[in-house]
Amino acid sequence: MGWHYAALEDRLARLGHLEGALAILNWDTAVCMPEAASAARGEQIATLKRLAHELLTADETGELLAGAEAESDLDPWQRANVREAQRRFRRARALEPALVEALARATNACEMTWREARRRSDFAMLRASLEEVVRLVREAARVTGAALGLEPYDALLDEHQPDLRDALVAPLLDRLAAALPPILEVAIEANRPFLTPRGPFPVDRQKKLAERLLSRLGFDFRMGRLDASAHPFCGGIPVDIRITSRWREDEVGAALMAVLHETGHALYEAGLPRRWLGQPVGEARGIVVHESQSLLLEMQICRSPAFLRFLAGELEAAFGPDPAWTSANLEALWHRVERGFIRVDADEVSYPLHVILRWRLEKAMLAGELAVADLPGAWAEGMRALLGVSPPDDARGCLQDIHWPVGAFGYFPCYTLGALLAAQLAAAARAQLPGLEQDIARGDIAPLLAWLRAQVHGRGSLPRFEELVREATGGPLAVEPFLEHLRARYLERAAAAA
Amino acid sequence: MGWHYAALEDRLARLGHLEGALAILNWDTAVCMPEAASAARGEQIATLKRLAHELLTADETGELLAGAEAESDLDPWQRANVREAQRRFRRARALEPALVEALARATNACEMTWREARRRSDFAMLRASLEEVVRLVREAARVTGAALGLEPYDALLDEHQPDLRDALVAPLLDRLAAALPPILEVAIEANRPFLTPRGPFPVDRQKKLAERLLSRLGFDFRMGRLDASAHPFCGGIPVDIRITSRWREDEVGAALMAVLHETGHALYEAGLPRRWLGQPVGEARGIVVHESQSLLLEMQICRSPAFLRFLAGELEAAFGPDPAWTSANLEALWHRVERGFIRVDADEVSYPLHVILRWRLEKAMLAGELAVADLPGAWAEGMRALLGVSPPDDARGCLQDIHWPVGAFGYFPCYTLGALLAAQLAAAARAQLPGLEQDIARGDIAPLLAWLRAQVHGRGSLPRFEELVREATGGPLAVEPFLEHLRARYLERAAAAA
């Protein structure tokens, strides 16, 4: 290893520390910060981001990268570290500071307008501001794509999931668009009546139960914590993981499932290679893979009948006896399928249809085929075609998500590709871990976690995306394991009921 | 206002945002951070500090300062802002990066060793590490002093309280060293028996009472919060003030008085000139002035008989009836005076004697007149001479404070000068606010707070230290108001009892 590589790693470590500090400030903003501080906090975050950007895009970084690439004695981790650093450097250098600033200003303004527009369900209020964001994102995608040798939309996908291309996304989502509606129809008919658990559920007891389950699933509270925020998330850094959920006294399921979802993200972060903490190769492999870990834990494990048997006992221990605490009732309750308007409330059968709608619309907007002004109409039409319902107002329609106002285009497909990968990983794990069902029924996922650490978590960003998928599951990303999972969970119960 | 000044203010704002981010990270370290994150957090903080240092010491900062100093149309605030920025710049430039790094490394190591040495009460364990810190601090004081035209020890004092010199400190502390022992002796004889309030005192109720008192005293929770940490402190920034205390179920006084002390710091921060938030002139005027605000609130106001009458009612409302909740009993309890070993547990009569010991010893160590190896013996001897007791072990002797291990020399005198200034400000306020006693008896300090905002808080760093003292109190810093306060509180009760 020569001095270029060593100096590069030092520089990347500094960048990693800045990003770690930003992660904690972002957590603080959501969990702790008093309201009067929001302008000052915005300036703190902008200052740290600017310094991180300057550090990354400096000529010196480019020289160190070139020098390190020429070093012949790097090990595979070091080589992958250089590759991932180069990827970031090229992307960050692709955009002129003026465009970066214009985007930051436009998305800040659009986010604020969006909050008010959503409250009032008034799309007209958002229109001009969103047009400006679309215009700038289109320009950024064009410029970045030109620098990276990618189509503009691929340049956006690649930002969230390195190496993801629409040529992979499109056939998968198109197959789902065809396969899901009939499954959805049968699954809805097979919904069963359920008993609603009787509250109130004191928040401190819900939080204690969540902490107990987190520990049981392998989360180590010596390197993380669980708090409350307006929207559940998992932030921080791998040795300081900050999970949040939101609790209400009158309902227990949503907060609990949110915690279990975030636990999947948290276990991924906790399992990243510690030796490479703070270096690009030590980071998670991208949003698709991250989402696969949360959905694997939530959907594949924690909503499975085996785990629900275990969970029924935990709920009774936490909140006292209730006829609702049976695994059959929890299945009826938490395997319920609906044609809803809201993506974040959607079940796993209809969720991809919400995503497909957004993926089609964002591509059309970026291609200039759909005017922002025509979004509400296109949304209603798309919802009818995919889900058979159309929203009663824009708040429950095209104003529901924060992604576009903050400039996050090319992100939505990651959710559904994550669901596909989760199912594919779960199928591979089941094939290789014969005792898995019994483990899950005891709430013990240690063997599964060890498998995930070996196949996914501990590899960081060493493999490329497709390598990781192929090496862990034996094949490329596909829809079959996911559809198989849906059929087993939702159609077999229909067959049983018939 | 010319472009130099405007560009300087921009640059200082960036520095302020970095320092604000650091303040929140430091709070998080004490309040939230899980243990496994401490090394990573250390790196985050070091990275931000390094970037702040680079921003401050860049040649460009020096050029902007020189340009701004030459601008003729600055208003007094702008001019003071340049002066304070210049002060920081010169100080930061005085030290070579190698010395800064060596100090950071030595104090980090020494702090860790100190924690273990204190736990084991083993001074020998600390010795080599503290010798290294003393050596480096001595060198830093010499170099900084040379750059600023100050004696080495003055260069250290000036870091914590700008413009403070040992020529001011020495006569004040020497007079106290002579005046306090006889007061202490009589005050101890006049201690009265008291009833110990009967717990337990549930922590959530203690915290609610603390929040209620904070609000009553004028703290606005829209720009701050109250949490628990191992040691009480007040951190954050003026629009995001983070107060902490530590609560125990079996005792109510220490945590309550700690909150009231920190409230004094918090009200100062909250009252700093908002127009200058994040600029040097918008910051507090130094540690002596900061400490004067916490001691004014705790010692002059909240431990006064008038406030204790109000507090007795609050305690009864919070914890139910107890014969201990009378103002006479609270006075007996909280005006108790002792010859103790521990500075942070000391009453206001003996506290300055603890400080004088440390001030003498640190000057001797820095001057090379006292070897670090001889510290335990010198400590025991000094305690006997000043307080008439000597510590049973080093944990309760020279290992009790964190200051020297972390390189904070020249800091201890600020505590006692703060106590002097608190008494002097309180005397001035009493003379100018005739209804003050009645206000305090109602727990309403709004008129006093308005006076402090005009005389101290709202002025930020506009006046120099001596100007602030003189303009607010009519004279230079002196021991008489403090001694007068002690006589009134501790000797008159002796006379009454005799």
Image (cartoon, coloured by chain):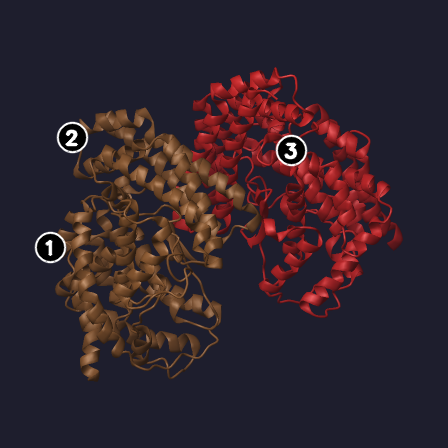
Chain colours: A brown, B red
Task: State how far apart marks 2 and 3 are (Cα).
Answer: 54 Å
Task: State how far apart marks 1 and 2 are (Cα).
Answer: 32 Å
Residue labelled with disc 1: A475
Numbered tag placed on residue B286 in the rendering: 3
In the image, residue A320 sits, relative to residue A467, either above or below, namely below
Q: Nearer the viewer, mark 1 or mark 2?
A: 1
Numbered tag placed on residue A73 in the rendering: 2
The tally of labels here is 3
A382 sits left or right of B25 in the view: left
Residue A349 x, y percent position in the rendering: 25, 67
In the image, what residue occupies the spot 14% across and 68% down?
Answer: A434
Amino acid at circle 2:
Asp
Chain assignment, label 1: A
Q: Secondary structure at mark 2?
A: loop
Chain assignment, label 3: B
Q: Earlier in the sequence, mark 1 or mark 2?
A: 2
